Amino acid sequence: MKTMNILVFSLLCCLSSKSVLSSSDHYNAIFNFGDSYSDTGNFLITGALAYPEIKNLPYGETFFHHATGRCSNGRLIIDFIAEAFGLPYLPPYLAVAEGPPVRMGVNFAVAGATAIDASFFSAQNITLWTNDSLNVQLGWFKSLKSSLCTTKQECDEYFKKSLFLVGEIGENDYSFSFLFGRTIEQLRPLVPQIVGAIIRAVSILIEEGAVNLVVPGQLPTGCFSLYLTLFQSANESAYDPKTGCLKAYNALFKYHNNYLKQELQKLREQYPHARVMYADYYGASISIYRTPKFYGFYGGALRACCGGGGPYNYNNSASCGNPGSTACEDPSAFVDWDGIHLTEAAYHFVSKRLFYGGFTSPPLLS
Ligand SMILES: *[C@@H]1O[C@H](CO)[C@@H](O)[C@H](O)[C@H]1NC(C)=O
Ligand SMILES: *[C@@H]1O[C@H](CO)[C@@H](O)[C@H](O)[C@H]1NC(C)=O
Ligand SMILES: *[C@@H]1O[C@H](CO)[C@@H](O)[C@H](O)[C@H]1NC(C)=O
Ligand SMILES: *[C@@H]1O[C@H](CO)[C@@H](O)[C@H](O)[C@H]1NC(C)=O
């Protein structure tokens, strides 16, 4: 019991303080690829034409007190990761591309980005928010690389001490397809292709010198108020009685995650020198959907904090930031921020579990 208490205490100590790291957990830099779950401003810099709401409050209201381009009220998982490693918040690539080299990390993520190239979707008349897919982001990394290091040896040394995050990415490949009328049955066969695009990006980064890589899976997106509203079912058996989430959608995201895990294992065998970590966003977050109040989310997990009415406070004609929508008083009591993104409090919860809850394998901290 005593050791348990000490263990619990030491966990609590580290959750609240900033970085208490062993020497092997020090990184020089973080490089991040992804979509709106980790974009710290790239999409905003491109004009955010498809989603101008993120230019204004209430986006950013809680932590930064102004809109930064983050699709939340405050910090994202990538921000908590940067804090934990004692590194600055990642600047968006498009803000630093022309300036002096940024040696402590850069964020290539773009809200709305897909894992598969944008042309794949336009060929099917699926209109995306952005063409800055994972491949475009990799191209940005390659052009930045020459400003960071020159010889192969120098680059290897530098990247050996860097942390790379590839994802979360892929959620938009599914969501935009659903919004344009595709069914779960139609998308299931696409899983290998979406995961394949992620795996390809990870192997390119390893070939470029990355050694420490985190590859997150999907969140239980069938719990998000946009999904619950737009893809609602009159059939009660469509809902998971434990959470109220849409079972078939979550099953697709679990299938994606399992497929990704299996492909990552192959990568580990192919590149034994690399530390390829799977981050289980689904597992790290699902308990807040089961017992939100137990974790302090008194507003529940399924209703958006910011929205324009309806059973889940998601209204497609008055989504967060638009006339007719309002933000809740206390976003820290909510899991769902705007229908499709989480609140800072929920991202913080997931981050703690990635660090200390065993939801990253192999573990992110040694
Ligand atoms: C896309 O739209 C164009 C023009 O409406 C149409 O000709 C084409 O068949 C559509 N393609 C698909 C894959 O739906
Ligand atoms: C993406 O590229 C296509 C084809 O070049 C273009 O028509 C479209 O406007 C672009 N979309 C965005 C959001 O930039
Ligand atoms: C509800 O869904 C279940 C399981 O998918 C199915 O067996 C049942 O026939 C559906 N009921 C109705 C009324 O559609
Ligand atoms: C959704 O928003 C529209 C536009 O503001 C409004 O007319 C409508 O009543 C809202 N729906 C709900 C369910 O609140």
Image (cartoon, grey):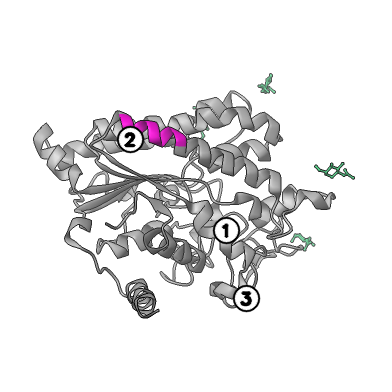
Label 1: which secondary element: helix
Mark 1 crowd level (few <14, some 14–19, many ≥20, 10 Å Cα)? some
Q: Which residue is mark 3?
A: 298
* Residue 225 at x, y percent in the picture: 67, 57
Q: Is residue 347 magenta?
A: no
With 349 as the anchor, is 305 left or right in this view? right
- Of labels 1 and 2, the one closer to you: 2
State the extent of the magenta-drawn residues as a range.
262-269
Question: In the image shown, does 51 or 193 lie closer to the viewer?
Answer: 193
Q: Does any atom of ligand 3 lie closer than 8 Å to the CB of label 1?
A: no
* Type of secondary structure dominating the magenta stretch: helix
CA gap between label 3 and label 1 equals: 16 Å
Label 2: which secondary element: helix
With 236 as the anchor, is 223 left or right in this view? left
* Residue 190 at x, y percent in the picture: 58, 29
Location of residue 9 (image quadrant): bottom left
Q: Which mark is residue 256?
A: none
Assign the N terminus to one quadrant of the image.
bottom left
Is tag 3's residue or tag 1's residue first in the polypeptide sequence?
Answer: 1
Is tag 1's residue or tag 2's residue first in the polypeptide sequence?
Answer: 2
Q: Are marks 1 and 2 in contact (CB under 8 Å)?
A: no
Q: Is residue 172 above or below residue 326?
A: above
- Of labels 2 and 3, the one closer to you: 2
Q: Which residue is mark 1?
A: 286
Question: In the image shown, does 315 or 262 lie closer to the viewer?
Answer: 262
Q: Which amino acid type is shown beneath numbered disc 1?
A: Ile
Q: Are marks 2 and 3 in contact (CB under 8 Å)?
A: no
Q: Are marks 3 and 1 in contact (CB under 8 Å)?
A: no
Q: Is residue 141 above or below residue 235?
A: above
Question: In the image shown, does 339 or 19 lie closer to the viewer?
Answer: 19
Q: Which mark is residue 268?
A: 2
Location of residue 189 (image quadrant): top right
